[in-house]
Image (tube, helix red, strand yellow):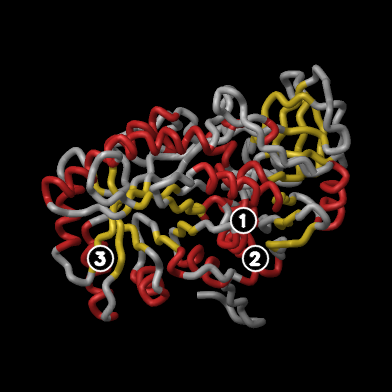
Amino acid sequence: MNHNSEQAVDGRTSDSDRSALEARDLAHAAHQFGTPLLVIDERQLRSTMRRFRSAFARDGWRCDVVYAAKALGLKAIANIAHAEGLALDVCSEGELQAALQAGVPASRCLLHGCAKTDQELALALRSGVGYIVLDHHAEIESVARMAAASGAPAPVLVRINVGVAAQTRSQVQTSALESKFGFPLTDGQALRAIRAVRERSALDFRGIHCHIGSQIVDLASYSEEIERLVDFASQLELEHGVPCGVINVGGGLGISSEDERGAPTPEAWAQVIYEPLERTFAASPRTRPQLMVEPGRAIVARAGTTLYTIVVRKQLGTGRTALIVDGGMSDNPRPALYEATYPVRLLARPSSHSDVRYTVFGRHCESDLLFRDVPLDDPQPGDVLQVADTGAYTYSMASNYNRFPRPAVALADGRSFRLIARRESLHHLLDLDVFDEPRPGEARA
């Protein structure tokens, strides 16, 4: 396997950053575990985690790289992230429990969420998570009440909406003015929220958090975000006497297959984030805040490869040839949600130079169009398609639409494959149904 992580001269990622699992190994995995199958290249994953940590290591600063578990929150992935020195961002009881059961200390977890339940908050407080990120006023009251009852102050960050509409799809913008997340900066809500937190002795205000969206490849959005966060942190301390110990800028960095220009490297992203921080604090006697970044997709996406078996080849009324595979929107809803694109090739003939293009559909009872205009060398039923960059938001967003069981996930370490998520059994799926069958001769009401 080749895991060269060279970057392009313009500071954008290149194809060398993608998983380089050998076709023969993937074919073996497809035979061993069946398809659809998500394969995670462990060496690529660890290499990317180390690259992010290195990119954000800077003299005079403390920065935590926090893996956004929502991208792929399996226990094995959480364990690898912790082993590589990353903290974890979790946004549900399920994600937090997975992290804890994977051996991640609660102190290395941040609990997010725009509508956290009391059960989730109780688990976070009981476990001793590093931070709870507060998202609305009712949550301030809930966490204060529960923390007071526990007898230990809760360390919290306040999520700020800085009003930056990131250059990405509207569905994944999370800091535009109409966003549901956080306390808006523009109308004073953010400042009032921090005052409310500091008025409650059971809450320990540590700093601010922001996340502007996903699939972002234009660093100008991050530049605008961090400028506003740094200005607000300075205002808090200089005008209101409130030190801001943490500035968490969130994640959302795109990957190259999401933009024909490629995507920024971790190093380029780090430079954009550090510039205003260093400009503000270089000659200042003020204590430098701890920095946090929360990449998810940018860490795990390119380590993932999905394998599908072609089931049907047929001609459409347009004359275009269609392929239907044994998976679809239940294991990867992103093409349907955002028209997301992925590199696709035949596993048996990966170096095709065919001029013939195919439309690849999933097998669900919808149009379920997965991939458009894919050049392939005479694909036939039984052939396996290899889809790159699928490590993020595929398995984690998988559903049981049409009562399909969720697929398996395998981890490749360069020598062998091992399951890190079993293929869901139909028995497990149907066992969730509650159905009281009438006894013989008994009519239903």
Query: Which residue type does callout 3 highlight?
Result: Asp
Which residue shows up at 57% across the image and 71% down it?
A: 103
Proximity of marks 2 and 1: CB atoms separated by less than 8 Å: yes
Q: Amino acid at mark 1?
A: Asn
Residue 400 marker? 1
Which picture quadrant has residue 364?
top right
Cα–Cα gap, marks 1 and 3 = 41 Å
Look at discs 1 and 3 and give the one toward the viewer: 3
Give the camera-side residue of 353 and 433. Answer: 353
Q: What residue type is disc 2 on?
A: Leu
Q: Position of residue 33 (x, y in %)?
A: 81, 57
- Residue 5 coordinates in the image, percent (x, y): 66, 37
Left or right: 84, with 61 as reference point: right
Residue closer to the observer: 250 or 213: 250
**Dot placed on the residue nearer the N-terminal end, 2 or 3:** 3
Say which label, 1 or 3, has the lower sequence index: 3
Say which mark, if any, is on residue 28. Answer: none
Looking at the rendered image, the quarter that the N terminus falls into is top right
- Mark 1, Cα crowd under 10 Å, few <14 / some 14-19 / many 20+, is few
**x 57%, y 37%: residue:** 336
